[in-house]
Image (cartoon, rainbow, N blue to C red):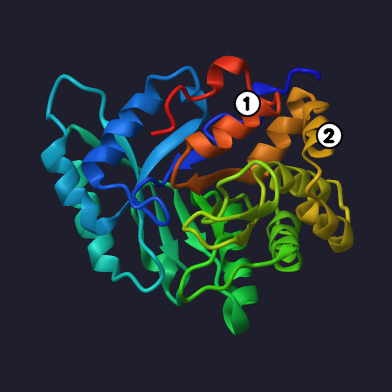
Amino acid sequence: MPATPPELFATLIDDAAVFPPGRAPLPLALTRHTRHRGAPYAATIGPLLLPTDLIEPLTGLVPRAGVRPVRVGLIARPGTDPAAVTAAMTLAGSHPGTEIVSVDIGWQPGWQDLSLGVPMAVEIPRGDDQQRAFDEVAAAAARGAGVVGKFRTGPTPEWSWPDEAELAAVILGFVRRETPFKLTGGLHHAIRGTYSPEGTPEENHGVVNVLLAVDCALHAKGAALLRAVLADRDSRALSDAVSNWGAPRAAKVRRALTSFGCCDVTDPLTELTHLGLLPSDHRPKDAR
């Protein structure tokens, strides 16, 4: 198998250890994140994702001097009070051991009024407001406002799992508007399949499937092909297809898909290494 361009996986996986289904306590999540940042696969790992209410506890765990600041992606789920976001930003900014590098918010009318000085991801809703949200985020991204889109690929009690038809439509919605985007929730595995993250079997989209679907969208392929790619469970065929990309093609895909959040980054890393898409030394030695 040809070597996969390293550009394809650079800072692809944001560390969402404290979120379901992992739900790691903050001290453990911080310990693991520090370990990841010093591992051979460190280049594949993005920031530690934390909700607004964990910023204050984080500042109590991180020394004020003598260490690299913890790079944090601040997560404000849809419905979060904007005041909580600005308060968390202020608190983190006052501590030299923490650095907010991005903020994720849920789309709501007036979201453009939130000016934070860091890159911002806006989560696209379902329903009647979706097209408006797509268009507003696309307009902000085109202005160079440091805005990207975001979509949830995993289920919650309030959010049913988006199947391949829905995810294909969302990917096309972003790509056709030339809007970079990230994904969150449910991307724990390299290949589409039925998994049991909390003991109950459920469908999960695959990271490799998603990368290939983005590539198809960038090459003006239609929704039917994207649906087929997202539904494909043939790990060898999928990984062979990705491994044939050159660096320019991989970089183009990653300009469109900026990252995804995963509650245990060692899961997709282990599988991507097993498939030969990452070097053997990128296989985490201890998943926990």
Q: Amino acid at mark 1?
A: Thr
Horizontal arrangement in the rendering, residue 229 relative to residue 127 (left or right):
right
Q: Could one spot residue 100 in this view of the protein?
A: yes
Query: For this rendering, which residue is in front, 227 or 88?
Result: 227
Which element type, helix, strand or loop, lies under badge 1? Answer: helix
Q: Residue at x 51, y 56 (%)?
A: 185
Disc 1 crowd rating (10 Å Cα; few below 14, some 14-19, many 20+) is: some
**Residue at point 52%, 33% (across, down):** 11
What residue is shown with label 1?
273
45 sits left or right of 162 in the view: left
Alpha carbon of mark 1 to alpha carbon of mark 2: how far? 15 Å
For residue 121, above or below residue 73:
below
From this viewpoint, which residue is outermost toward the front?
199
**Residue carrying label 2:** 241
Counting the numbered discs, the total is: 2
Q: Residues within 10 Å of mark 2 (few under 14, many from 20)?
A: few
Q: Amino acid at mark 2?
A: Ala
Mark 2: secondary structure: helix
Residue 95 seen in the current view: no
The part of the image, by quadrant, that contains residue 99 is top left
* Depicted 238 relative to depicted 35: above or below: below
- Quadrant where the image shows the C terminus: top left
Q: Name the quadrant containing residue 275.
A: top right
Left/right placement of residue 80 relative to residue 10 reads: left
Q: Of label 1 and label 2, which has the lower sequence position?
A: 2
Q: Which mark is residue 49?
A: none
Q: Position of residue 87 (x, y in %)?
A: 19, 58
The residue depicted at 82 percent of the width and 56 percent of the height is: 226
- Residue 37 x/y as whole percent: 38, 25
